[in-house]
Amino acid sequence: MLERVKYSKVMNRLSNEQRASVIACLIEGNSIRSTVRMTGVSKKAVMRLLVECGDFCAEYQDRVFRNLKCSRIQVDEMWSFCYCKQKNVTEEISAGHVAGDVWLWSAIDAETKLVPCWYVGARDAVAGTEFIKDLESRLANRIQLTSDGHHVYVNAVIDAFADEVDYAQLVKYYGKESADKTTQTRYSPAACTGAEKVIRLGDPDPKHISTSYVERHNLSVRMTVRRFTRLTNAFSKKIENHCAAVALGYFAYNFIKINRTLRMTPAMAAQVTPRLWSVYDLVNAWDAYEREQKRAA
């Protein structure tokens, strides 16, 4: 059995090798407790590393994802929850926690598979507008944008892009839910009965009006970011931990994991970085960032 490594003031910090072991486990979708068992690092230290590394990943990607030469962007939202499900939120819980439904808004470049930005929040007009404005600020040229039929996108795109975008919605229609509530049907997706391509702005190419890539990416998030796994107790108890896990997951997706179709990482395909990153590269960059922050303080 591995000897438990405690994160203490005496020790000050874990070595970069120990940090890399913890981050590698989290990137591969392991839970906090399984990471503790595999690395010997205490639970408190693992949680702290997740938040601190996640904050660095968010800051780094926010800084380098600028003037991107994307051409076709797809956007979507994905549901999760924090602390407890929305139906179980009480006044007492909401007074002390961010609890209930939490939505992840994400964008993906259909060519390079880069995720240039994401937003964690509600599924309303405010969140949609902030998300689309953030996306617009990172682009260097006019794009073709596709979303689902969520009504908040139209005004959000107009506010962010004005008429400098080719935008369409792929509106899908679903059949009525079956009266059969067996276990098999309860967790099955609703049957899609049709789809309509609706042009909202500009002159989008009809053959590229699609949300297939971003919907497939949603599956990747649920498979690799442990807090999005359905029907488990792996959900986040704190919104800060949730956001950190999302940022770390996207860093691994953009910089560390090779896309099998592209045979390179999305960040390499988008010319954000010339090389393949490893977990050790992430830890070393994080370490340099921490040292710079200490000198600045």
Image (cartoon, rainbow, N blue to C red):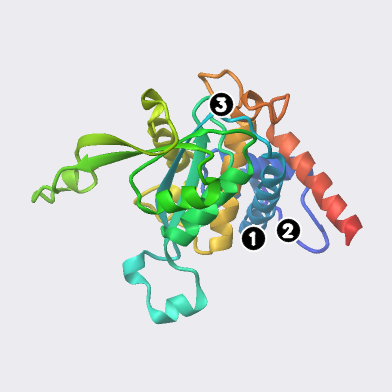
Give the labeled residue for mark 1.
44
Q: Position of residue 121 (x, y in %)?
A: 49, 59
Tell which of 73 and 102 is nearer to you. Answer: 73
Q: Report the side of 49 relative to 262 (left or right).
A: right
Residue at left offset 41%, top offset 26% = 205
Label 2, label 3: how many angstroms apart (C-alpha)?
A: 39 Å
Rendered location of residue 204, percent (x, y): 42, 30
Against 239, residue 217 (above or below) is above
Badge 1 density bin: few <14, some 14–19, many ≥20, Cα 10 Å: some
Query: Is label 2 or label 3 in front?
Result: 3
In the rendered image, the vertical position of residue 126 relative to residue 188, given as above or below: below
- Give the alpha-carbon distance from disc 1 to disc 3, as whole Å: 37 Å
**How many numbered marks, from 0 up?**
3
Q: Say whether residue 43 is left or right of residue 189.
A: right
Residue 150 circle label: none
Whether pointer 2 and pointer 3 mark residues with C-beta atoms closer than 8 Å, the reply is no
Q: Which residue is mark 2?
A: 7
Q: Is residue 200 visible?
A: yes
Dot 2 and dot 1 residues touching (CB under 8 Å): yes
